Amino acid sequence: PLKVLLKMTVLAGFLTSSIQAYAEPIQIKFSHVVAENTPKGQMALKFKELVEQRLPGEYQVNVFPNSQLFGDNNEVAALLLNDVQFVAPSLSKFERYTKKLQIFDLPFLFENMESVDRFQQSDSGQKLLNSMKRKGIVGLGYLHNGMKQLSASSPLILPTDANGKKFRIMASDVLAAQFQAVDAIPVKKPFSEVFTLLQTRAIDGQENTWSNIYSKKFFEVQSHITESNHGVLDYMVVTSAEFWKSLPADKRTVIKSSLDEALAHGNQIAAAKVDKDKATIAASKRSDIIQLTTDQRQEWVSSMKPVWRQFEAKIGKDLIDAAVASNK
Ligand code: LMR
């Protein structure tokens, strides 16, 4: 009987392993709008690598960059339909789901990326990850890109230089108000259209990080870039509550820790890219980089900062105060 039992055990073991070998891994889609040589692009690839290494044969992560699968206008809707399981839109793109995240768009709120990081990691910042819970959206973590610069087809030195000019913005009312504050014309457009809009001169300028200006070649079609550091462009990695709850608890733990490590990796790349991508743009001589004097920059601050008051009621004064405090 022992022999029979042994045989049966071996057979059962063989069957289980062959079932596992033939079972298809569960497919997870991660869609984003930027190039692969960016903090977000590299973070998503690191996430794929770690999940597939730690759950071999069980889960496969397919990353779709460059708005290939979904773009700004439909990625969160696709997430809620479970057509994609992870997206990481910039914090400016969640306005339809919560007004709280508008805080990140307030011009000249954060002095630098360390302040942004302190605020995101604080209790107030961590609470914001849950701000879209009622909409079925789960915030899993923040990812840095960096501070935004202003680019245009003419030099922008004083706020009056922006008068009457058209600027592409992400779909955010705070960003619209920011450009209206300097008598410019904000135009909400998806990221995938920006290069062509600039190249054809349908719009005059835009705001973005060094990484995006470089990886999407905006510097080749904008004669001037003002190093304004006037706002932040960061991301929230989100999934749907439906998908997240459907995962077995032990797998969810592995997927979450893989994401946390991927985010740390992406943040390192973000920090390195500021100087690197800016230097590459400068070396290309395609675009003049304008450094503002303290007085010139102060003019932009004075023109744009009144925008805070317009959004204070919706965002909450306490939250704004907490963000200001993160400047130390
Ligand atoms: C933009 O639309 O300019 C950015 O949000 C793109 C991105 O994801 O970095």
Image (cartoon, grey):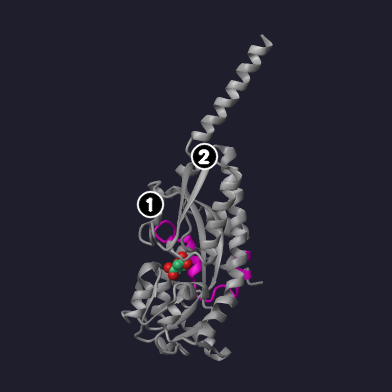
Position of 211 compared to 9: left or right?
left
Residue drawn at (54%, 85%) of the image: 283
What residue would you read off at disc 1?
A: 78
Position of 189 compared to 311: left or right?
left
Tell me which segment is drawn in magenta.
Answer: 94-118
What residue would you read off at disc 2?
A: 247
Q: In the rendering, at what x and y percent does residue 273 appear?
A: 58, 72
Which quadrant of the view contains residue 112? bottom right
Residue drawn at (44%, 47%) of the image: 136
Q: In the rendering, at what x and y percent does residue 169 appear?
A: 40, 72
Quarter of the figure that contains the C terminus: bottom right
Position of 248 compared to 313: left or right?
right
Residue drawn at (50%, 44%) of the image: 244
**96 in the magenta segment:** yes
Q: Secondary structure at mark 1?
A: helix
Q: Nearer the viewer, residue 248 or 196?
A: 196
Regarding residue 36, the answer to whether it shows in the image is yes
Mark seen at residue 328: none
